[in-house]
């Protein structure tokens, strides 16, 4: 059954030291990720729609590619090794089987972050076309609130709108950077998997 929490947990379990098998600390990366994602929205111009559109296009292509890898991993049949193979061959095959399962969660986690990035990007593209004063126009707050509070309400509304826009940008860059990091890491693991799979095929010849 599909579970976002399970995908996140399983992906985290693949971040280990290959020599010791212990989980690698990732807090430095996430601290950097949070810091840079909080900084970039303050530096980018208000209108960066061209960049957002490019991100949507590239992320869509990468998600399509990752789904191809996902389907390959799910459809790949594991052959049983003969009983007379060497211990080294059995160990290598066991590691490849484990890596195949780990790649499934790596790709799934990438799809999760990439689709989240696309969703926030779509929100950014439609934000300029949203009239944030619609509610204020729909309800006549001026007649409900004393006149002396009108300036405070307008200032609070502007601050709330600016905060919402900043939060959306923050989520956009957060998911973008995390998806790119995950994609790069997954590609390295996929290349390693295919290289070892090919070497096993050649050993059979």
Image (cartoon, rainbow, N blue to C red):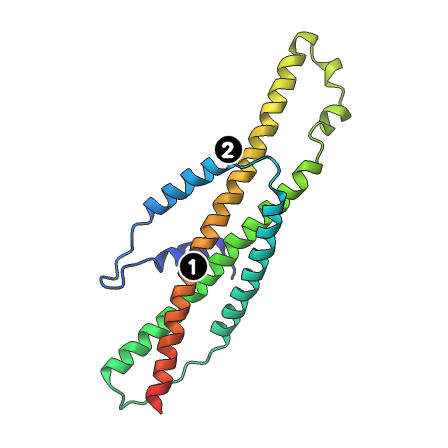
Residue in the picture at 30% in, 58% down: 16
Which residue is disc 1 drawn over?
A: 184
Residue farthest toward the top in the current orientation of the protein: 148
Q: Nearer the viewer, residue 141 or 37?
A: 37
Residue 128 located left or right of residue 20: right
- Is residue 6 at all visible to an observer of this figure? no
Query: Which residue is the site of mark 2?
Result: 42
Q: Residue at x 76, y 24 (%)?
A: 137
Disc 1: CA contacts within 10 A as few (<14), some (14-19) or many (>=20): few
At mark 2, the secondary structure is helix
> Which residue is found at the position 56% from the left and 30% from the top?
163
Residue at left 59%, top 26%?
A: 160
Q: Earlier in the sequence, mark 1 or mark 2?
A: 2
Q: How many marks?
A: 2
Quadrant of res 149:
top right
Q: Which of the 4 quarters of the picture holds residue 148?
A: top right
Q: Residues within 10 Å of mark 2 (few under 14, many from 20)?
A: few
The image shows residue 31, relative to residue 96, as above or below, that is: above
| Closer to us: 179 or 101 | 179
């Amino acid at each position: 059954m599909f579970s976002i929490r399970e995908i996140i947990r399983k992906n985290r379990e693949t971040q280990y030291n290959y020599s010791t098998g212990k989980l690698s600390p990732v807090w430095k990366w996430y601290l950097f990720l949070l810091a840079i994602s909080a900084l970039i929205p303050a530096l980018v111009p208000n209108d960066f729609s061209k960049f957002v559109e490019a991100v949507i296009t590239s992320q869509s292509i990468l998600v399509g590619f990752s789904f191809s890898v996902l389907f390959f991993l799910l459809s790949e049949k594991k052959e049983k090794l003969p009983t007379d193979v060497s211990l080294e061959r059995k160990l290598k095959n066991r590691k490849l089987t484990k890596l195949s399962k780990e790649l499934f969660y790596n790709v799934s986690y990438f799809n999760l972050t990439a689709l989240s990035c696309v969703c926030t990007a779509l929100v950014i593209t439609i934000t300029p076309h949203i009239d944030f004063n619609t509610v204020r126009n729909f309800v006549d707050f001026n007649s409900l609130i004393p006149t002396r509070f009108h300036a405070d309400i307008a200032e609070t509304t502007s601050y709330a709108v600016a905060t919402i826009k900043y939060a959306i940008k923050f989520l956009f860059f957060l998911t973008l950077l995390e998806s790119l990091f995950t994609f790069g890491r997954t590609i390295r693991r996929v290349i390693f998997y295919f290289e070892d799979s090919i070497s096993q095929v050649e050993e059979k010849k």
